[in-house]
Image: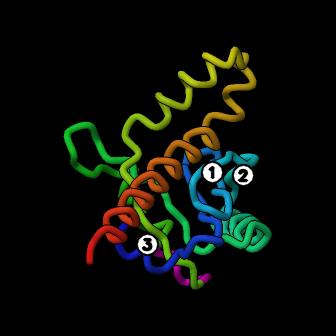
Amino acid sequence: MEELAGVALPGQPLGGLDLGTKTIGLAVSDLGQRFASPRPVIMRKKFTQDAGALLRAFAKEKVAAVVIGLPINMDGTEGPRAQSTRAFVRNMERLCELPFVFWDERLSTVAAERTLIEMDVSRAKRAGRIDSAAASFILQGALDRLQALRATSARRP
């Protein structure tokens, strides 16, 4: 996150991703990098189609960097899903110049589901929104950390 503070300057939105097996959740920050907003999910097909859809979304939103949830196990280890996410990012980095930053996504889907339930979103509609809501939680966590880093560095002489 520290290197992201120097790359993604305020005035440039950041993207957030939650990589699911069937869908890719997408979120985008505001220009001030304070608030994350979910975008429609991308239905996963083949990597080239998924990458194309993401690149179009990134270009449309003019994102400066992408925060992607890294599915770390509750004990802190990385399993097959984390390895798959890292491989996805390596392949995306070959296609674009955007920096990708990993963010620990533990419990982001649980938090997103709770929020959607509190909003009285039906089970059927939750299924279609959960990954983008999780992407929004992931991105919001990163934005909050970024704000804290900037505030700390602003106080230093």
In the rendered image, the vertical position of residue 146 relative to residue 115, given as above or below: below
Residue drawn at x 63%, y 44% is 22
Magenta segment range?
90-96
Q: Which residue is mark 3?
A: 5
- Give residue 103's position: percent from left, percent from top: 40, 55
Element assignment for label 1: strand
Q: Amino acid at mark 3?
A: Ala
Mark nearer the viewer, 3 or 2: 3
In the rendered image, the vertical position of residue 142 relative to residue 107, given as above or below: below
The answer to which of 11 and 133 lies nearer the viewer is 11
User: Which label was assigned to residue 42?
Assistant: 2
Element assignment for label 3: helix
Q: Is residue 21 visible?
A: no
* Residue 37 part of the magenta segment: no
Find out whether the residues at labels 2 and 1 contact each other: C-beta distance under 8 Å.
yes
Within 10 Å of the Cα at label 3, are there few (<14), some (14-19), or many (20+) other Cα atoms?
some
Which badge, 3 or 2, comes first in the chain's sequence?
A: 3
Q: Which residue is mark 1?
A: 24
